[in-house]
Image (cartoon, rainbow, N blue to C red):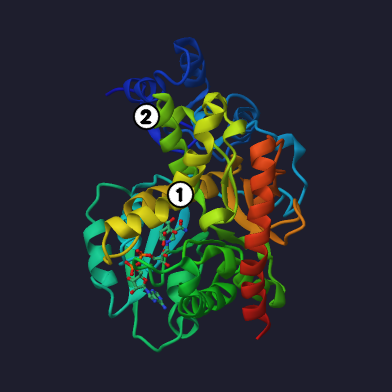
Amino acid sequence: MAERRIDPEDGAAYTWEEFSAYYAGKYKKKAVEAYWEECEKRGRTRASAKAKAKDEAWGKKAEPKAAPKAGEGQGQSEGQGQGQGCEGEVKSAGNFKVCVCGGAGGIGQPLSMLMALDPNVKELCVFDLSVAMVPPAGVAADLGHLERKSEVKGYVMEVGQKPIDNLKECLTGCDLVLVPAGMPRKPGMTRDDLFKVNADIAKGIVEACAKFCPDAVLGLVVNPVNSIVPAMAELYKKKGLDPLKIVGVTTLDVVRANKFCGEIMNKNPNYINVPVVGGHAGTTILPLFSQDKVAKLIPEDKIPDLDKHVQDAGTDVVNAKSGKGSATLSMAYAGARLGRSVLAGLMGKKRTECAYVKSDITDLPYFASKVQFGEKGVSKVLPIGELNEYETKRMEEVKAQLKGEIETGLKYAED
Ligand SMILES: NC(=O)C1=CN([C@@H]2O[C@H](COP(=O)(O)OP(=O)(O)OC[C@H]3O[C@@H](n4cnc5c(N)ncnc54)[C@H](O)[C@@H]3O)[C@@H](O)[C@H]2O)C=CC1
Ligand SMILES: O=C([O-])CC(=O)C(=O)O
């Protein structure tokens, strides 16, 4: 039988054929061979001091899978030191409990599938209401047949009940809770139009997380992210919990910026990593094309349209779906990318992704920027970096719009 070695990046075991095929084109053959040599053979315990030392060395060395996707090295060392330190127990690979709230919905189902496939997920909880389009137990039964080690469980709640009264078993022990629970837009609506109904949904879930899994990272997908994240982070603060556990999921903006840039430049988007900062609605979405090595070569006159294309991408999908929802599949892909990075961070492998969090890198209290995920979740909120003239002007627009949307969230938390 072919030898398998454990890739410290995701904790899964691969044959040389699988391993070299994955990295082919991303790194030189010699670098891939050297990395393989460093990987543990399957069967050795990752908990040994030797293995741990090796892991640490890898953390500082090549970070091969993360490098092309996550924009590592783009200003990481300048972190502002916000967030928690890195001491504490590090969970080993393949041992995480993840919950997807709204897991039977348009985003929830494919996101649950991608998380069930993640080799780091040991237990996946699919939570939704009894009125969901499919019973969560059905989604769980379906995903439970994937040939993966993850155990998938469904949890259902009647409309009108409270998550805090129903989710003890579901949430206890969770490391990551992803929340695509809530109403999506229809054509003609703004994300803001969803605020009241979705903030109430998020509040119920966040309150239950505060009680049953206060150390978990909460990835809030639910819109409007720009207002709901401040509202929920302030609720966490009031309870004496860390507001940086509340993470607004803006990964789809990065995914779109990479894709559209790849189309224009005729390049593989896997090699592009455009940071997208600000927020997740209209003008607050600011892709920093000047900060990616491929994107910065885009002719200047093409940038305004490309910027607008990224800003409007969600609305384009809403319109194309003609009243039958908003982006679901690309969102699930993006949410799983963030989820993977969060779990890698919890394992002690630092990862950088853009996310909308409590922040002091600008004069606004919440802002999307590159964020480093570490052993307890957000470990650093990274600075914006250098902006060109176009981006500097756009930043003013971003802040003017975002300010009011943050205030909506803060006011909700006060009431
Ligand atoms: N952050 C981002 O980039 C994106 C955010 N979104 C947002 O994600 C949210 C979900 O979108 P879709 O999955 O398309 O909607 P959907 O309507 O298909 O699914 C939402 C699910 O949430 C469930 N739900 C509602 N209230 C709940 C509660 N109290 N507890 C548990 N589950 C509950 C529903 O039963 C449903 O299954 C929307 O608010 C949408 O605007 C969508 C795309 C991108
Ligand atoms: O546009 C929407 O309503 C959903 C969303 O946030 C996106 O696709 O970016």
Given residues 32 and 305, the one toward you in this image is 305
Mark 2 CB within 8 Å of ligand 1: no
Give the amino acid type for the residue marked by disc 2 in the picture: Tyr
User: In terms of image quadrants, where is residue 229?
Assistant: bottom right
Most extreme residue toward the bottom is 160
Q: Which residue is mark 2?
A: 14
Q: Is residue 89 visible?
A: no
Image-based side of 140 in relation to 115, left or right: left
Which residue is painted at 59% across and 41% down in the image?
352
- Residue sitting nearer the eye, 115 or 366: 366
- Rendering coords of residue 313 (x, y %): 41, 50
Dots 1, 2 in contact, CB < 8 A: no
Q: Which mark is residue 283?
A: none
Q: What residue appears at the point 50 percent right and 82 percent down from the top-left corner?
A: 164
| Quarter holding ligand 2 | bottom left
- Distance of mark 1 from mark 2, alpha carbons? 29 Å
Residue labelled with disc 1 = 252
In this view, the residue in front, 239 or 270, is: 270
The 10 Å Cα crowd at callout 2, few under 14, some 14 to 19, many 20 or more, is many
Q: Is residue 97 visible?
A: yes
Q: Is residue 335 left or right of residue 3?
A: right
Q: Residue at x 60, y 56 (%)?
A: 356
Position of residue 143 relative to residue 193, above or below, is above
Q: Is residue 193 above or below residue 12?
A: below
